[in-house]
Amino acid sequence: MSVMDHDPQPSSGGMGRFLVIGAAVLALVAAAYFGVTMLMKPAPKPEPVQATREAPPPAPAAKPAEPAPADETPAPRRPRPKKDEPKPAEPAAPPPAAGPVLIVDSDVPGASVFVDRKFVGTTPLRTTEIAGGSHQLNASVTGEEGLAQTIEIAETGETAIALKFREVRLNASVAVVHKHSMGRSCEGTLAATPAGMRYATASKNDAFAIPFGALEAFEIDYLKKELKVKQKGGKTWNFTDKSENADKLFVFHRDVTKAREKLAAQAK
């Protein structure tokens, strides 16, 4: 048999190498396909990150409503002195004056004061220059009627005198004869105080008491020596006296008229 006629068979070692090479080629192809596929696939969009907000702090708890203050504020209490603390000493009273002291005050300040016709000062006044005993005091101030009175000054200590210029003082009286109609008459006393006028007589039917507000007429006729008193809407009385002239009636009328005018001015 010739060499040309023989069909050679592949050996087992060559077949193995062929299979290994084929497997490697397939692996390379698969890897390449997978890589291309991954490159062509779009990348996933990143999910937006939500900003995290911190929870707000809890609201403070509401304070309970305070009660309304009481209408009346309690009076403050005086602190009690401690037992150990000594009490403050009371101020000593001023020593009494060794001699007489005259104190004069008035309802109208600045009144001039005279004692026994000697000027001693103006009110309010305090002096030790007047000796104790009985003295005549006179006082005057602009716009008011002067005052005159007898005073008694103590030999020791204070003697206080209050001068009331604005007080209505009236204590006048005069002995009169009431002239009736039909020639009759009766005697009595006509007196006046700040409360009014009154006529006191033994004849009870002729006696009267009239407040000044009820007087309609109060007139003096010096030449006739006659004093007329007329009640509003009522009776009229005519008085005279046993003196030779009407001086006493005139003084009575003057004093009563001044007092009536002063009372009327104070009533306005």
Image: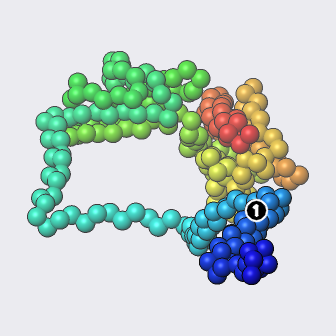
Tell me the quarter of the picture where residue 83 sits.
Answer: bottom left
- Number of numbered labels in the structure image: 1
Position in image of residue 160 (x %, y %): 33, 39
Residue at the outermost right position: 233
Position in image of residue 42 (x %, y %): 83, 59
Quadrant housing the C terminus = top right
Which is more toward the observer, 193 or 267? 267
Q: Which residue is drawn at 69% across and 73% down?
A: 18
Residue type of the residue flagged with mark 1: Ala
Tell me the quarter of the picture where residue 245 sits.
Answer: top right
Position in image of residue 247 (x %, y %): 62, 29
Looking at the picture, does residue 213 appear above or below residue 23? above
Left or right of 146: which side holds 243? Answer: right
Left or right of 133: which side holds 124? Answer: right
Quadrant housing the N terminus = bottom right
Q: Residue at x 51, y 65 (%)?
A: 73
Q: Residue at x 64, y 66 (%)?
A: 55
Left or right of 49: which side holds 89? Answer: left
Mark 1 crowd level (few <14, some 14–19, many ≥20, 10 Å Cα):
few
Which is more toward the observer, 200 or 265? 265
Tell me the quarter of the picture where residue 87 sits.
Answer: bottom left
Q: Residue at x 62, y 31 (%)?
A: 251
Which is more toward the observer, 61 or 167? 61
Residue marked by disc 1 = 32
Mark 1 secondary-structure assignment:
helix
Looking at the picture, does residue 31 appear above or below residue 183? below
Q: Can residue 186 be seen in this view?
A: no
Looking at the picture, does residue 13 appear above or below residue 73? below
Looking at the picture, does residue 85 appear above or below residue 112? below
Q: Is residue 112 visible?
A: yes
